[in-house]
Structures are given as structure tokens and as C-alpha cells.
Amino acid sequence: MITIDSLTRKYGDFTAVDNVTFEARTGRVTGFLGPNGAGKSTTMRVMVGLTPPTSGSALIDGRRFADLPNPGREVGVLLDASAQHAGRTGREILTIAQRTMGLPKGSVDAMLERVSLTDNEANRRVRNYSLGMRQRLGIATALIGDPHVLILDEPANGLDPAGIRWMRDLLRGYANRGGTVLLSSHLLHEIEVIADDLVVIGNGRIVAQGTKSELLEAAGTVVRSDDLPGLVRALDAAGHSGTPYADGALRTDADASTIGKVALAAGVALTELRAADGAGLEEMFLELTADTQREGVAA
Ligand SMILES: Nc1ncnc2c1ncn2[C@@H]1O[C@H](COP(=O)(O)OP(=O)(O)OP(=O)(O)O)[C@@H](O)[C@H]1O
């Protein structure tokens, strides 16, 4: 389990991570979501001892990363897949990790197979790897010590849809066997399919956290009507706000039964009524982090 408690990291006057508290639980995949510059990498760097916190703490199974005797056997880390030595082959990089951690020789081949890097690819220098191949090698390096905690910064970057599915299955199996996974992304749909729990960060602060189903519930209901203005007025009068989608649907915080009653009383016919799905979550994610989006949120 990873426990982040009141963690703050300042750079001069700038607060990159602001009093952040959350847990990544055992047996679950936790997605750490936020737009560019929100503070995800800084939080992860503190977790693995690369950046000291200004205040607060980041503990792995109750201990600081720096206090772990053989960290690679306990925590698998992928922070920047491009930081691997470009002049070494994938096999050499894994062999160094295998020797440093005192692992059996066969673990290199087993790991190459597990991340689907062929012999030919493993013998190529990393400078000739695609981004997706670097991510696979990075995940292999994180997994080789058979740790029970994984900390992965943007691991889906550069993976194609088949690669994302592969990673989802790998991380799901890992969590089902009792592992703890924390992975970051700035794209909701990339980790929505993988994560059980979500922690949303914007401007260094946690703006939402919970299980995926809780957050989906909080994302509200999607409703459609041929008389959308009439429906908006009726919902507004009943104290419920709504966000119109470009395609003419409306997302609202009211539940389906309330919407049905409000619409009936106002004489407005509904053409669709359902719980918000991933698109609703995406809208909510954009709204929650709106003041940190460079592009702002399109209405
Ligand atoms: N060494 C540093 N010195 C000064 N500012 C820093 C330093 N490292 C990070 N920052 C700032 O802290 C903020 C958070 O950066 P961080 O890399 O943690 O964001 P992120 O959520 O990982 O973003 P991305 O999705 O773009 O990787 C940014 O504004 C960044 O410029």
C-alpha cells in the first residue's frame, strides 16, 4: 500500500504539490489523473526518493522508499521510459537490473517474454526503440524484481490500442494477485479502462478521489429531449444544474428519477435518459481541472 499524507513540494515560491493526501490500496489499480503540470510526476518522484518533500510524507507499506533495503524487490518504478541508456540493448538493461537485485539469470528471458519483446528487439540498442518498445522495456525493468508495488508515470504513453489492452491485462493480473499499482496519466480514457480507483489532481491539489464507480455516479445523468431549453428551465427551477454537450445531450447532477418527475411536471418529453458513462467522467474531469487546462474547457 502507498500512503501519501499531507504532502507538499515547493520550488521557491511555487507550490507544485499542495497538501496532497491519498492512498493506493493493495490489490487495486489506482489511476493518478491530472492535466499537464498538475503535479503527478513531482508526487511520484517524492514517493521514490528522487525529490525530498517540503513537508508531509510518502510511505510504501509504512516505510520511506529510501529506507527499503532492496527497493527493486519491493517497488517497481517507471518514471521516464526515455531515460534508459540509449547505447545499451534492452537485454543489457534488464541484465544489469537482474544482477543488481541478485535475481536468477533466467529472469531476463522470462521478463522479455512477459512484455512481448522479441529476441531481435531485445538485442537492439534502445536508441533504435520506438516509444512503445521503451515503455515495454520500462515495465519489464519495473517488474523484474517481482515487487509487490508498482509506480508507473504515464506508462500508456506511446502504446497503441493493442499495447494499452496488453498493459491493462498485465496490471489487472498483477493487482488480482495482491499487488498495488499506481499509474499516472493526463488522459482519462487511457486509465479509465485500467483503474479501480481514481485520484484527480489539478494545480497541485487533489480535486476528486474515489472508486471509479463512485466517480461515475458523481458524474451524473445524461438526458436528451427535443425541447432542451424547456428541460433546462425546469431542472434549473428544481435546483439542478446541467452542462450541455455539443451533440445536444445534457449532463446533470440530478438522478434519473428526479429528471423524470421534473420533465413530466413541465410537460417535456424525454428522448434519452441514462447514467453518465466515461464521456460524463471526462466532462467532469475537465471541469474539475478547468483552471489548470491551458486551452480552457470548450462549452
Ligand atoms: N525542478 C523543478 N523546478 C521548478 N519547478 C518544477 C520542477 N519540477 C517540476 N516543476 C513544476 O511543478 C509543476 C508540476 O510538474 P509535474 O511534472 O509534477 O506535473 P505533471 O502533472 O507530472 O505534468 P505532465 O502530465 O505534464 O507530466 C509544473 O508547473 C512544473 O513546471
Image (cartoon, rainbow, N blue to C red):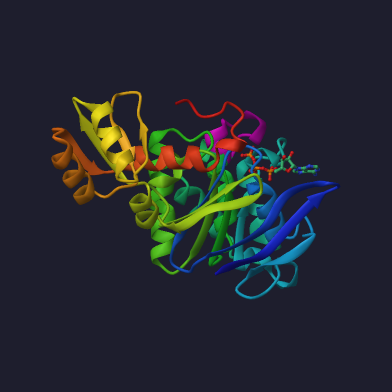
Q: Residue placed at 35% from the left, 28% from the top?
A: 245
The mark tally for this picture is 0
Quadrant of res 54:
bottom right
- For the residue pair 294 and 139, the one nearer the viewer reads as 294
Residue in view at x 33 percent, y 46 percent: 220
Residue 273 at x, y percent in the picture = 19, 40
Residue 28 x, y percent position in the rendering: 44, 63
- Seen as rendered, the residue at the extreme right is 12
Depth check: give the residue in front, 240 or 174: 240
The x, y position of residue 241, in whole percent, is: 37, 41
142 above or below 60?
above
Specify the quadrant of the image occupied by residue 229. Answer: top left
Q: Is residue 186 visible in the rendered structure shown here?
A: yes
Quadrant (top left/top right/bottom left/bottom right) for the C terminus: top left
Is residue 128 placed above or below 105 in the rendered structure?
above
Range covered by the magenta-colored residues? 123-134
In the image, residue 72 sits, relative to residue 142, either above or below, namely below
Q: What residue do we see at 20% from left, 43% from top?
A: 262
- Residue 86 in the image: state x and y as whole percent: 70, 36
Q: Quadrant of ligand 1?
A: top right
Q: Is residue 259 magenta?
A: no
